[in-house]
Amino acid sequence: MDAATIPEPISPVKEFLSKTQKLLIDGKRVEAASGETFEVLDPSNNSVLTRVPKGAKEDINRAVKAARNAFENGPWKKISVSERGKLIWKLADLIEARAEEFSQLETLDNGKPLTIARAVDVALVIDHFRYYAGMTTKIHGETIDISVPYAPGADFLDFTLREPMGVVGQIIPWNFPLLMATWKLGVALAAGNCVVLKPAEQTPLSALHLADLFQEAGFPDGVVNIVTGFGDAGATLAEHNDVDKIAFTGSTEIGHEIVKASAGNLKRVSLELGGKSPSIVFPDADLDIAAQGVASAIFFNQGQVCTAGSRLLIHKDVYDEVMERVSEEAKNIKVGPGMCADTNMGPLVSREQQERVLNYIRSGEMAGARTLTGGQVPENLESGCYVEPTVFDNVKQDMKIVAEEIFGPVVVAAPFEDLDAVIARGNDTEYGLAASVWTKDINKAHKVAKGLKAGTVWVNSHNIFDAAAPFGGYKRSGFGREMGIHALENYTQVKNVIIQLHD
Ligand code: NAP
Ligand code: MG
């Protein structure tokens, strides 16, 4: 791709990229204690966008201390819930005013098409903060009638208080950098916690841009702290004895590490992990909608979506027809730099991820799967981290491409014969994050939705997210729910107060 044909970022983005990047600790923008920095790359051509601080143990310790102080001693506790809501709403307004900056930064850093960064990532971010701005005034306890059999005739008032956890550590991945930060921050702040956020090393930029806005919105110092760095920074946060709760989104492998690290002080844990979600197509589905829908279920965001519809299960009667259409959809996807207006699919996030995905593709080919389309690095795009949209069939359950999460634009397809068999097949995975069912038959839709062990089931759609709709995993896809009122469970604890009323 000729560099001259790629649109330039707007000037505030260029200014952001040219300035010295800093952590946010205790309301101040600071360098890493070590003074070290690391490169941030644009995966469309692997050029260096900027450098960011390499936060590590000392920085995490300082950030946790700042969050603790803000939680125990700062003005945060005394701010009314209504004022707290206004701060979060103000944050949403500030992001909205800079929506184009955030969208372009996300595209440059992660690779995703700018059209998607605008319409999905940043739009959801703004909406999400507004949803939780409205929730601050709706968090409440309950009153309970108690009988106490060993105190006959006594009179009690029992009520609960729903209180914040305290200091919360949040570790996020690189696939939707700003949105993942938002899913974590919105509810944590709404519930009155103080936060230390560790963005992924591959995509730290939108979180660092967001860091400026907490001050501007009027959040007290130390309520939100942002430390960029590598896995060791995340590990320090996960094992820190003064962190009350750790929230993690990322791979199942690191999820195990988080659980182990949390054991020291038995901090609360919530995990959003990997997936291998089935898209199930019945013969009575509207096949135009279904073929397009299941293709987008896997190829959206370059397949780097924890809910990607990476296992396609198609009824045998329409298997050939749907496979032909899905392959056609894949071939028509325009792959290129995210900044170009006509790009449908950008590069993967990094060379490492590209290699990982290509290795899966090679393993599928060697195991005897048939490549219907894709499987290569697209021609003339070798300088970036691109992989063609890839469709496999002739697959067996024990192939790595069927069992493991690829986290790239690769789908494996297989035919099925009946409803019970497809539910069993859908559940034949260690994951349980999501699934979609494509049918016009309401009975089949409900039966499959009920039969699948997954945290989200979409019917005649896939990858639909809303701040009000709870999201999370069954099985090894994690535990705890983000979004909606359900997310409050992760960020509050219940205190029971019993008062004996004497005459
Ligand atoms: P990852 O390697 O697990 O990393 C996730 C985050 O954890 C990063 O910030 C990473 O830091 C940090 N980290 C690495 N080692 C750590 C350790 N020992 N202790 C604490 N933190 C540590 O995952 P990824 O490659 O970034 O993202 C892809 C994975 O995330 C996929 O498996 C995908 O399914 C999953 N994901 C799940 C959801 C969901 O909601 N369920 C959403 C998105 C992604 P560095 O990267 O800076 O080293
Ligand atoms: Mg990057």
Image (cartoon, helix red, strand yellow):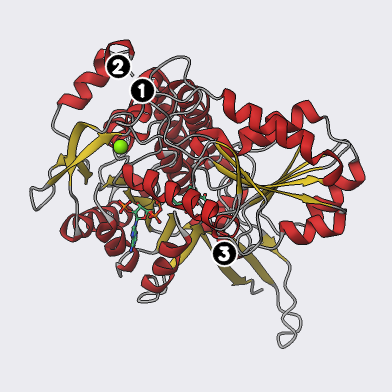
Q: Position of residue 205 (x, y in %)?
A: 29, 35
The x, y position of residue 440, in whole percent, is 88, 35
Residue 158 x/y as whole percent: 64, 67
Question: Marks 1 and 2: CB-CB under 8 Å?
Answer: yes
Q: Earlier in the sequence, mark 2 or mark 3?
A: 2
Q: Quadrant of residue 185?
A: top left
Tell me if residue 8 comes above or below residue 137 in the rendering: above
The amino acid pointed to by label 3 is: Arg
Q: Would you name the residue on which mark 1 appears? A: 104
Residue under numbered circle 3: 476
Q: Residue at x 40, y 34 (%)?
A: 386
Say which mark, if any, is on residue 72: none
Residue occupied by mark 2: 9
Crowding at mark 3 (Cα within 10 Å: few <14, some 14-19, many 20+): many
- Ligand 2 located in image quadrant: top left
**Ligand 2 closer than 8 Å to label 1 CB:** no
